[in-house]
Image (cartoon, helix red, strand yellow):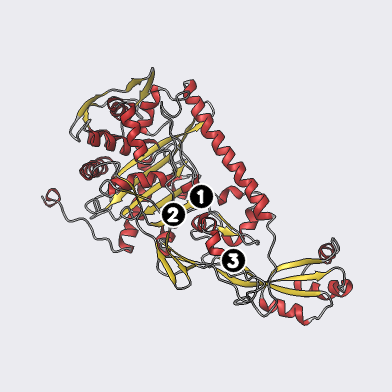
């Protein structure tokens, strides 16, 4: 590996480590040490002075995903309270070890919290004891009725209350509402959110991801489902996941599970990136689908030999065959023919190296270096490796957003997960945000046809009966200091359909599969199952038969 490549791998690793350390520190300082707010007593919270009820979150069809309910804490007045009576009478109700209770109420002066999380019935039992200095207070407690479902999309809320990750973090200020002030007797509840996420589609994505990890032996993975026409995320699943109702159990040892890799983790995408390379070449007029080149086992770019994945030459091939066989030499041939100025101009137009602006907390920007932006680390060899998705980094949501532009007639739109914001009587509906047109409509249609034929020729595992699928496999190496972590790969497949009128774009990403390193073997079957189920769920009609299919 060249010094330039070593520096890039080192930079990617350092950035990942720094991000992880920042997350861990954030969790420890703000989540663990967040202090609960005081609140009214047993009569309840709604409409009373004190903290406001946090806004609720629903899926697109009205399924409740997050809400507040009332819980109670037990308080002891250390100065004026009955210490002996408290220890004797409270222990049987709270089922606390006597030593723990004594330690809790004997450590400080003033008012101390004995325990939290009591139901109304339990709180009434404590109040009925009428122990001098012992009181109960109600507080809002965040509840996620669906448990682990869509955990990374939702995030969670600590005791303060403050939202972390997902929409809870991104929309924290709006969800929290306005607490009552001394001169005002009532609170203003937080705004409610209706997501673009479909609860059933999310469950399907999570179920098929779990099956895919089990079948392939992959360590982790993600599935993203988006409508390429308007940028609505219909499902976004990542594993391993967690239950936001029990986030505190993971704070100290497994807080990295809070981070959503679909939006916050960069990776080298590998051969799925050839979609963007060919899009640029077609749009620029460098090639047409029928343009041929002599495919050799390797090509020299910037003094470095870049090999096909199979170390073979495939003779004279056209662009459809190049994509179907996923030939690195062909992709590097395209980028070098275009030249670095043109090539990187298209990559920037597709959003490579910048956040998408999705409304989820903690989005990463990706990594793209060019001669203009990073002359000390860029080399001409990068012009070749970037063409097949090495030497640059993206998040899964960046990749989906870029490829969705091809499915959407060349128009790229911003992805989003909130469909409506409800603030009292005011309802704000999310609009389609156009972020650019990296390629023309004609180029998009031409490339869709190429990708459709590539799937038909080489990726049978991704085909859905009755539907024409446009897509591409990916088998990406994983950078480590000094090189790549062989033999491990990130296997992926991204595809959209029906090709004649794309309604869904789906990315399947599997990390370190043991069954096979190749996306065509591991990720494509997962895509096929997800697409089949979602086409049926949303009532998406098959493509009209083509002339060729009727013969």
Position of residue 389 measured from the top left corner of the image (x, y, whole percent): 39, 34
Query: SS of the residue at dot 3?
Result: strand
Farthest front residue? Answer: 183
Comparing marks 3 and 2, which lies closer to the viewer?
Answer: 3
**Lower sequence index among marks 3 and 2:** 3
Residue under label 3, please give it.
142
Residue depicted at x 54% and y 49%: 259
Q: Are marks 2 and 1 in contact (CB under 8 Å)?
A: yes
Farthest right residue? Answer: 84
- Viewer can see residue 253: yes
Residue under label 2, please give it.
236
Given residues 345 and 360, the one toward you in this image is 345
The answer to whether residue 317 is left or right of residue 255 is left
Q: How many labels, in total?
A: 3
Res 260 label: 1
**Lower sequence index among marks 2 and 1:** 2
């Amino acid at each position: 590996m060249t010094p330039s490549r070593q520096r890039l791998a080192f930079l990617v690793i350092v950035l990942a480590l720094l991000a992880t350390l920042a997350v861990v520190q954030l969790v420890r300082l703000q989540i663990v040490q967040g202090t609960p707010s005081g609140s009214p007593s047993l009569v309840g919270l709604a409409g009373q002075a004190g903290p406001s009820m946090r806004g609720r979150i629903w899926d697109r069809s009205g399924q409740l995903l997050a809400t507040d309910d009332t819980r109670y804490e037990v308080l002891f007045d250390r100065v004026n309270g009955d210490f002996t009576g408290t220890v004797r009478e409270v222990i049987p109700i709270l089922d606390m070890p006597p030593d723990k209770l004594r330690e809790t109420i004997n450590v400080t002066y003033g008012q101390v919290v004995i325990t939290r999380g009591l139901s109304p019935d339990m709180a009434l039992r404590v109040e009925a004891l009428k122990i001098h200095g012992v009181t109960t207070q109600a507080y809002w407690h965040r509840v996620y009725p669906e448990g682990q479902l869509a955990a990374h999309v939702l995030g969670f809320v600590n005791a303060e209350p403050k939202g972390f990750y997902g929409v809870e973090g991104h929309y924290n200020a709006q969800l929290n509402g306005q607490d009552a002030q001394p001169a005002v007797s009532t609170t203003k509840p937080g705004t409610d959110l209706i997501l673009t996420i479909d609860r059933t589609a999310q469950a399907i994505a999570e179920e098929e991801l779990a099956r895919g990890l089990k079948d392939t032996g992959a360590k982790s993975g993600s599935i993203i489902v988006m409508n390429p026409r308007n940028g609505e995320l219909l499902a976004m699943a990542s594993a391993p996941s967690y239950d936001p109702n029990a986030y505190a159990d993971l704070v100290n040892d497994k807080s990295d599970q809070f981070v959503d890799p679909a939006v916050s983790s960069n990776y080298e995408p590998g051969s799925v990136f050839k979609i963007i390379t060919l899009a640029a070449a077609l749009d620029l007029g460098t090639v047409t689908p029928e343009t041929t080149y002599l495919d050799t086992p390797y090509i020299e770019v910037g003094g470095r030999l870049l090999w096909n994945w199979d170390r073979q030459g495939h003779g004279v091939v056209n662009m459809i065959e190049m994509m179907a066989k996923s030939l690195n030499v062909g992709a590097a041939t395209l980028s070098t023919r275009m030249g670095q100025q043109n090539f990187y101009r298209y990559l920037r137009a597709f959003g490579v190296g910048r956040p998408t602006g999705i409304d989820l907390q903690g989005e990463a920007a990706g990594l793209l270096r060019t001669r203009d932006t990073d002359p000390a680390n860029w080399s001409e060899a990068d012009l070749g490796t970037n063409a097949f998705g090495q030497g640059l980094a993206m998040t899964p949501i960046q990749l989906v957003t870029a490829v969705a532009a091809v499915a959407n007639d060349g128009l790229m739109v911003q992805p989003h997960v909130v469909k409506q914001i409800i603030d009292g009587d005011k309802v704000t509906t999310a609009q389609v945000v156009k972020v650019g047109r990296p390629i023309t409509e004609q180029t998009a249609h031409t490339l869709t046809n190429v990708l459709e034929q590539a799937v038909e020729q080489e990726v049978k595992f991704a085909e859905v009966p009755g539907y024409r699928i446009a897509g591409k496999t990916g088998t990406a190496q994983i950078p480590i200091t000094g090189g790549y972590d062989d033999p491990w790969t990130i296997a992926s497949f991204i595809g959209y359909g029906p090709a004649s009128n794309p309604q869904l774009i789906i990315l399947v990403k599997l990390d370190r599969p043991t069954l096979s390193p190749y996306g065509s073997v591991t990720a494509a079957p997962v895509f096929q199952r997800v697409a089949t189920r979602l086409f049926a769920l949303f009532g998406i009609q098959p493509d009209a038969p083509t002339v060729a299919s009727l013969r």
